[in-house]
Structure formats: C-alpha cells, structure tokens
Image: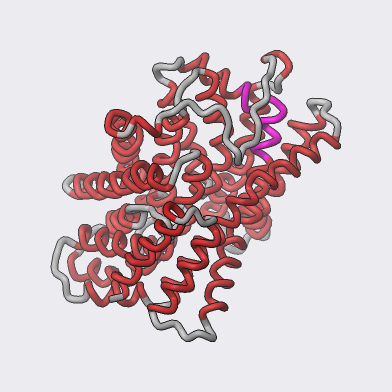
Amino acid sequence: MPLIIVALGVFLLILLITKFKLNTFVSLVITAFVVGLFLGTPLTKLPTIITTGIGDQLGELAIIFGMGSMIGKLVSDSGGGYRIAHTLISKFGRKHIQIAVVLASFIVGLALFFEVGLVVLLPIIFIIAREIDMPLMSLAIPMAATLNVMHGFIPPHPAPTAISGIFGANIGQVIIYGIIVAIPTVIISGPVFNHFLHKLYPKVYRITTEIPALGKFKEFKLEETPKFGISVLTSMMPVILIGVSTIFEFTLPKSSGLLNVVKFIGNPDVAMLISLIFALFTMGVLQKIPMKQVGNTLEGAIKQISVMLFIIAGGGAFKQVLVDDGVASYVSNIFMGVHMSPLIAAWLIAAVLRVSLGSSTVSALTAAGLVGPMIASTGVNPALMVLAVGAGSVFADHVNDAGFWMVKEYFGLTLKETFLSWTTLTSVLAIAGLLSVLALSLVV
C-alpha cells in the first residue's frame, strides 16, 4: 500500500502541473500534504515534517547553489565563460566537443556534488552550444551523466564514502574500481544514450538561445575577455579547494593541528565563499569592472535562481514526507529473506528505495544497512558492493528529487521531456553501472 500511495502521489503531482497548470512549488507542497495524509501521518506532525523538509533541502543547497550561481554569473558576464568555450572549441573542434565536455565534467565531478557541478559547468556548456550552433542537450546529456556517475560511485562524495565505512571497504580500492566502472558507464549513459535519444526523441534537441536561470547572453570580443588560465582557475576554484582538502584529510595524521584548518577550507560552504571572493577579484577587479556593476551581477544571479530554489524546496518537502512516514522501512521488509546475487540484491534494494524516496544518499545508506550482512556471509568484495549500491541509488530520478527539477529548469524542458530524457538517462546509467560492476566482479 505505501508504494501504491507514492505512485498515486506522483500521478497527482504530474496532473496538477500539466493538466491544471499549477505552479510547480505549490503542486509539490499540495502533493506532500496529500501523500502524508494517506500514509497516516498525524495531522499535528505533518506541517512540521513538510517545513523540515523544505528547510533541510534549502539548508543543504542555499549557500552552495547561491554562491555557485554568483561565480558562474561573474565568469559569464566578464567573458570568462566565452573564453573557455572558445578555447575548447578551437582545441577539440565541433566533432570532438563531447569528449571535452565529458573530461571537464569528470574532473569537476571528482570534488563537487552533482547539483554544484551542474551550476559550475552549465554556463560554459551553454556558451559552447550557442557558439557552434548545437542543441544544448547534445552537450548537457554527457555532462549531467558524468556528474551523476561521479556523485554516485566515487569517494569523497557522501554516499560512497559513508557506505565504504559501513561495509569496511578500502577507500582507495573503491576509488580505483569506481573509476574503472565509471568509464563504460559514462560512455553508455552519455554519448551512446545521447545518440539514441536524438533519433528517438529529437524534439528535445532544439537550439537554445537563452536560459532564464542563466540570464541574457552577452556578446563579447575575444581580446576583451579574461585569459583562459584565470577563467578556468576561477571556475574550478571550488573543485581545487575541496579536492586538495580531501587529499590532505587522507594523508595528514589525525593529531595534526593543520587538519582542522584543512577541513574548514574544504567544507563546501567555506570553499564556495572563498571561491566567490576570488571570483570577485579575478572577474571583477582585475577586469576593471565597476563594483556597482559587479553587485548587479550578483543580484541578478540570485534573482535568476529564486524560482528554482522554491521548486527544489518543494521537492524536499515531498521527500521528507516519504522518509518520515516509513516508506524506507516498508521497502526493507519486502526484501527480507530474498536470495539472489549480493551485488544484484544491493543494486535492486537501492534502486527501489531511490524511486520511492528520491534522495540518492538516503537510498544508498538505507540499502547499505540492509545488505551489509551479505558481505560476511557470501565473501563478496566490499568495494564492489559499494559500487553496486551506488549504481542502484541513481536509478530513475524523478519528481521526488531536487536534481530532477534542476535539470528540468536549467535545460529548459517540459515535465514530459524531463521524464523521457533525464529519468530514462538515469535508468540507463544505473543499469549500465550494475553491468559494469558485475563484469568487474569476474576479474577481481
């Protein structure tokens, strides 16, 4: 019954948005209330659960998302994004530009969460697509697929790092195996999926001249834009700070006084603040742009993402209702006593939880608690179990996850188009990830 209620809730949400043309945020909150009532949540607790969900979702993303948008807007408005795009086009050419996008996304995805990587990379991807007159989706699909793979499979991202601890897996081994598994998974869910989606659903491959969340596109003369090196450094500063901090956390002794400083700088909120201050200098002061104009750029960045923040908050409300009302426990009971390959069981449990709950991290951690005993009883490699859970935790992203709404708004898609492209992509990605893990299990 809980899964049927969740399915009906998703149907109600789609109906409110598509049939009745109701605002997405309002539709999400209404759906959260209705689903909560049918799941048996006490009337006195339901409002608190929903406001907690909204607060937690915005609390996790507001600083990172807001400052990330400001950095992206500064790089874009100063011409830095144009310089990066122009250089990548000249080095790789139109024919191989997808390779450049995948490589950039792979590097960014090593250190940044999916949502943050999307904010950092999309302005550059948009400019590249505009400059070579290519549909945005042709580049957005491989970018988003790569970021999602990195987020689900490879430490130091939250879920794979936490699961490695639960399973007692060696972090270094998880990273090495994760990269091996990520390569075929990215190829299949990125360029290969892109090719088939273009043939089967060409409607989404339209030329995009502007994205409301990014603001109006500015024309630049190349010689007036910041240099390529400083533009890349500014865009990548959050990646560098978090990445270097992570390396030091693994190498410095626990007793080192420097460790606390490193952890502080590597905190995503702090890293974004430092990166924003750096961007104000490199993309503002050094370019001799008046501070009033820089201030207008920052204000514009916040205005552009305000609607999206509300939509993401609504998704958080819906997710919190599902988590607090025991949907995870119900799914767990379904799989009690099921006998199958531990890798397939780990993937399947994580996938069902992902569809039911929305959050890939919550799904992964819940699944890890359920399948952990299988490691001791079957002798399966713990690192492979981490990757199997990670693959299942990104399956079929839909309306109860913030990432779904970010993709919809940023890529300029309708709800139907987002389901047919993004939800399908994440399903292909999860299945390709599982097959890659199973193939790797034959040789390690």
Q: Tell me the quarter of the image containing the N terminus.
A: bottom left
Most foreground residue, 236 or 126: 126
Most foreground residue, 309 or 164: 309
Please tell me in which quadrant of the rendered image residue 311 appears. Answer: bottom right
| Residue at the farthest front position | 20
Looking at the image, which residue is at 48% across and 43% down? 110
**Residue 266 visible at all:** no
Magenta segment, which residues? Answer: 71-83
Looking at the image, which residue is at 32% across and 39% down? 189
Most foreground residue, 56 or 346: 56
- Give the colour scheme shown: secondary structure
Most foreground residue, 239 or 41: 41
Relative vertical location of residue 241 with respect to residue 74 in this rendering, above or below: below
In the image, residue 444 lies at what x, y percent?
A: 21, 48
Residue 78 falls inside the magenta stretch:
yes
Relative vertical location of residue 7 with respect to residue 146 in this rendering, above or below: below
Q: How many marks?
A: 0
Relative vertical location of residue 352 with respect to residue 328 in this rendering, above or below: above
| Residue at the farthest left position | 339
In the image, residue 358 lies at what x, y percent?
A: 41, 61
Looking at the image, which residue is at 71% across and 43% down? 276
In the image, residue 290 lies at what x, y percent?
A: 85, 31
Residue 95 falls inside the magenta stretch:
no
